[in-house]
Every structure is written in C-alpha cells, then in structure tokens.
Amino acid sequence: MTRSGEPFSKRNRILSTAEQQFLERGFDGTSIDTIVEQAGGSKSTVYAHFRDKSILFAEALAEIRHEIDFSLSRFRASAPGYTTEALLLLTVELISVQFHQRALHLFRVVVSESNRFPEVARQYYEEGPAELVSQIGDFLSESLQAGAIHTGTAQAAAELLFSLSRGHRHMRVLLGLDPPPTPARTVAYAEEIVTRFVELVNWRDPPQ
C-alpha cells in the first residue's frame, strides 16, 4: 500500500527502495542495478519513471523529507498556553524531530551531496530547519501577544532556541559517537536547553 492507502505502484516501489538505499549508501554507493534487484522490474522500468539516477535521488530525498514532517503540530495541539512549561514541551518536540533516525540519515546524505545537488540542499533547508525556526517564531510571537516577556525579536529568539537544540549533542549523534537520546534523556536535554534559553532572553511567563 502507498502512504495514501492506494495500491503500491511500480513507481512507488522503486521510490521506496531508492529511499532506503540512498539513506544507507549515499548517491555513489547506490546503483540502479541494486534498486532493480530489490524493487523488481527492470532498468527500463526505472528509467520510464525517472529519467536518470539524479532525478531519482532528488525525488527520493523529497519523499523522505515529507515523511519526517518537520512540524511542531503535536506540540501546538497540546501546548499549555505560553508558559515555561510550554517552552519545555516545544523543545522536547523540537529535539524529537531533529534526532529522529531518518532525519539524522537524511541530514548526513544532504550534507554529503550538497555540492553536487544544491537544489536538494536548499529544499531540505527551507522545508526542514527553516520551517522549524518559523514555527518556533510563530509561537514566540504569540507568547508576546499573550503577555510573556523576552528580550530581542521573536525571530532572533527562535533562532537561538533552534541553535541550542542542535548543539554538541546533535553533532555527536550525527558522527555516530552517541546514540539518539532516549525519551528520558530527551526531556532532560530539553530542560537544560530551556533553562539556558530563559536566562539568555530574560523570559517571563504571562501574568496569571
């Protein structure tokens, strides 16, 4: 079945196989022969749907990016107002999105191929990190309207919170030096980040 619930077409099967191969092996390490072997069909079937390997690579990474859903919607659906507690829940969700295993694999592949595929890198940035910063900025703008106080603009504060959420831990996980954080470690990590963020922007909750 496809993600929409419709029968899995040959094109979807090729794309799904390509996604996994590119994440695991990168562009050069993935061959059309391997994709054909795992997805079935023939090379002519692949090229009937995707003009060349570069097109298949770009579309496969776009699919992965959409699957990950760089969104804080779960947080926004249950956010307890615009308090420090809400900041903590937002940060937990932010970390969870960025440290998701497929998100980490996608980031590695995009960085390794950014010179060869700058458009793929641009789309990843705009629909991934930039989208997260935009959503954080929306929350912080709304918090100001609700009576919260912090220094600087909502955009600057959003960029700061995003940067704090990446930090050295994200780099260590990307390099394979540490595993992604467990749920308990995610909360502890988020608490550290929020404490630092509140200090840096002089955050104060809205009046009760």
Image (cartoon, helix red, strand yellow):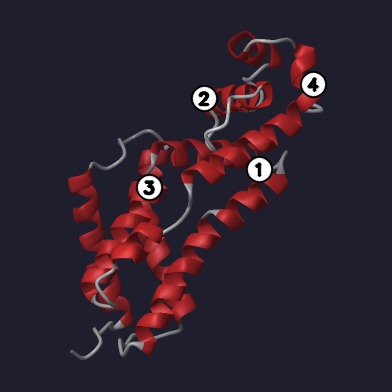
**Label 2: which secondary element:** helix
Marks 4 and 2: which is nearer the front?
4
Asked if the residues shown at circle 3 and circle 1 are in contact, with their CB atoms under 8 angstroms apart, the answer is no
- The reply to whether callout 3 and callout 4 are in contact (CB within 8 Å) is no
Residue 41 screen position, x and y as percent: 69, 10
Secondary element at tag 3: helix
Which mark, by number, is residue 47? Answer: 4
Disc 3: which residue: 170
Seen at 25% across and 87% down, the residue is 206
Residue on which disc 2 sits: 24
Alpha carbons under labels 3 and 4: distance apart: 37 Å
Residue 35: mark in rendering: none
Q: Dividing the picture into quarters, in which one does residue 165 lie?
A: bottom left
Inspect the image, locate mark 1, and give the three-letter code of the amino acid beneath it: Ser
Q: Position of residue 107 (x, y in %)?
A: 52, 42
At label 3, which amino acid type do we have?
His
Front of the two marks 1 and 4:
4
- Sequence-wise, which precedes: disc 3 or disc 2? 2
Q: For mark 1, what is the residue?
A: 114
* Gap between marks 1 and 4 measured at Cα: 24 Å
Q: Of the residues under marks 4 and 2, which one precedes in the sequence? A: 2
Q: Earlier in the sequence, mark 3 or mark 1?
A: 1
Q: Residues within 10 Å of mark 4 (few under 14, many from 20)?
A: some
